[in-house]
Image (cartoon, rainbow, N blue to C red):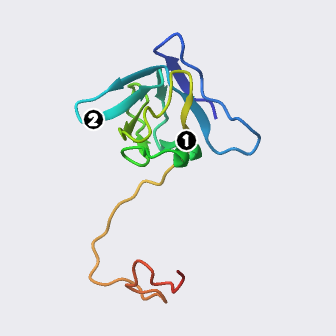
Amino acid sequence: MKLKVMKLDAGAKIPKYAKPGDAGMDLYAVTESFDDHGNYVFGTGLAMEIPEGYVGLIFPRSSISKTAHSLRNAVGVIDSGYRGELIFKFDINTLNSPVYKIGDRIGQIIILPYPKIEFEEAWELSKTERGKGGYGSTGTN
């Protein structure tokens, strides 16, 4: 699958897979700023043309677990109609700041197809073994 990507910044890097078999492609920081809500904002300098029927999902790198930070929206959803810059927002934590530096890999993107869903209101749902069991209902700790 070919996907159009546009560099909004001369220092931007086109995403690529680091190793064979990788699902996500690395994204790099080209700008760093702060927003009005106290978040670190890292720009990738990239915009994409994700085809209709597909979604881009941006995730933090697993190395974020070595810090006290987290990606503010956990997983970023990039809809096919969005043409703006891909950005990452991280919380500010005084114990471990800043999160990344310009040029660092800050996250990864996965492009996936999704089905078009039409909801149909129902008066009852089919029975399953799990039923209404929620958190922890499978019996594993």
Count residues near mark 2 (Cα–Cα under 10 Å), then give few for <14, some for 14-19, many for 20+.
few
Q: Which residue is mark 2?
A: 38
Q: Quadrant of the N terminus?
A: top right
| Rendering coords of residue 56 (x, y %) | 49, 40
Q: x, y percentage for residue 52?
A: 45, 39
Q: Residue furthest left?
A: 36
Q: Quadrant of residue 13?
A: top right
Q: Earlier in the sequence, mark 1 or mark 2?
A: 2
Along the horizontal axis of the image, is 20 left or right of 76? right
* Res 111 label: 1
Nearer to me, 14 or 28 = 28
For the view shown, which residue lies furthest in the right direction? 20
Q: Secondary structure at mark 2?
A: loop
Badge 1: few (under 14), some or many (20 or more) residues near its Cα, within 10 Å?
some
Tell me the residue at 36%/83% (across/down). 125
As drawn, is 101 to the left or to the right of 91? Answer: right
Total numbered labels placed on residues in the image: 2
Residue pushed farthest top? 10
Residue 95 x %, y %: 41, 42
Q: Nearer the viewer, mark 1 or mark 2?
A: 2
Residue type, label 1:
Ile
Quote the CA–CA distance across marks 1 and 2: 29 Å
Q: Secondary structure at mark 1?
A: strand
What residue is shown at x 50% (from left), y 18% (from top)?
6
Badge 2 amino acid: Gly
